[in-house]
Amino acid sequence: MGKIYIAGAHSRAQSVKAYLEYLYPETELISYLVDDMSDNEKVIEGVGVQLIKRGLHTECPVYIGTRGVNHHKITEELKEVGFTKIIPVTVELDIQLRNEYMQKFYKEQGKNFTVIDELYTENRKTTGNGTVYVACSIYDKPLMKEYKLADYETVLQVGSALTDERISENVLIDCSGDNISCKNKQFCELTGLYWLWKNATEDYIGLVHYRRHFLLPDNWKERMEENDIDVILPVPLYVAPSISENYMKRHMKSDWMYMMEYLKSYDLKEYNKAKRLFAGNIYSPCNMLIARRKVLDELCKWLFPILDAVVKHGGEKEDTYMNRYPGFISERLITYFFEERSNKYKVIYANKNFLT
């Protein structure tokens, strides 16, 4: 690999650095490149951040580690100063790097990392049923391209208690039965998770988002059943400098600190395990999963009391994005829950898409 640059300096770019350096130890990151220093640190874990300008080592490859919507603009800026080896980290390349990283990382940790596509199946018809629910709301921005739901996917309108408007006629809504739909502004897709916990009856119950769907083989239920799988989670991602530090850097530190204090008062042993995990870098994002009904029940019985305590302490935030902190915290908690119960539950992974 040799010397490289990475365009971008935020979380995505730092993940790209981790993937490349781990997979290709000869990699040497010269610096992160940005087009504006006002929102960036000058040094990130010993690596400098500098402007895209003339005079750089333009013979070196440069990976674009930003949101895809910015790739074209950054590519043009890099070409303008002389770069020719420009490698945008597309969704496909991110999936490739992430999977290769996790395969190597888990192997060195003595753990199993299995993606559902790799599971053996005799293609026997499953005796169980399953649905993957797609959390949608009336506030979702339109997709640039129409996306056809898989046969096993069903739309669930979340936050439906907050409006009389419906996505479509006869759409499932999260304000029927036992629900917390009115908390959607803070809990986001978790109001859907709660509704599934209390109301769904399938053998396998999944939750995804209107922009994020699992990439599953058509016979995913058969593969789960034949291999005695309890849970499918998204392929984990790497975040720097650690799970906890990354959260506190991007969100309000006080909410994370209270969550940890709650765990400490609730169960000291659990707190110590969580602290160790959150000092690491790997977690499954997006509050996406497919689980056996019993497993979903056990997760939610553990998860929601913690989130309720955190929200009771943290209250509502004026900033609408920061107000979604229960959802951001739950991503980390769900990862912890299954990691620390890996002897109890058989967990595998699936890749996901991200629709624009």
Image: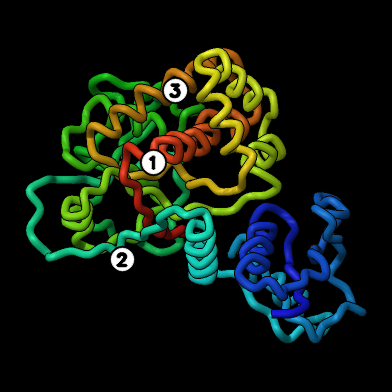
Element assignment for label 3:
helix
Q: Quadrant of residue 322?
A: top right
Q: Amino acid at mark 1?
A: Ser
The x, y position of residue 28, in whole percent, is: 77, 72
**Residue 236 left/right relative to 250:** left
Numbered disc total: 3
Q: Disc 3 designates what residue?
A: 183
Mark closer to the chain start, 3 or 1: 3
Viewport quadrant of the N terminus: bottom right
**Residue 184 left/right relative to 275:** left
Q: Amino acid at mark 2?
A: Glu
| Residue that lies at the very extreme toward the front in this rendered image | 110
Report how far apart the C-alphas of labels 3 and 1 lie in the structure: 31 Å
Mark closer to the chain start, 3 or 2: 2
Q: Residues within 10 Å of mark 3 (few under 14, many from 20)?
A: some
Pick the residue in front: 135 or 264.
264
Element assignment for label 2:
helix
Q: Residues within 10 Å of mark 2 (few under 14, many from 20)?
A: few
- The answer to whether the residue labelled 3 contacts the one labelled 2, judged by CB atoms less than 8 Å apart, is no
Q: In the rendering, which numbered label is found on residue 118?
A: 2
The x, y position of residue 115, in whole percent, is: 36, 60
Q: Residue at (68%, 23%) from the top-left corner?
A: 254
Query: Which mark is in front, 1 or 2?
Result: 1
Mark closer to the chain start, 1 or 2: 2
Query: Which mark is in front, 3 or 2?
Result: 2
Q: Residue at (7%, 58%) from the top-left corner?
A: 125
Q: Residues within 10 Å of mark 1 (few under 14, many from 20)?
A: few
Q: Amino acid at mark 3?
A: Lys
Q: Quadrant of residue 273?
A: top right
**Residue 348 left/right relative to 307:** left
Q: Disc 1 designates what residue?
A: 342
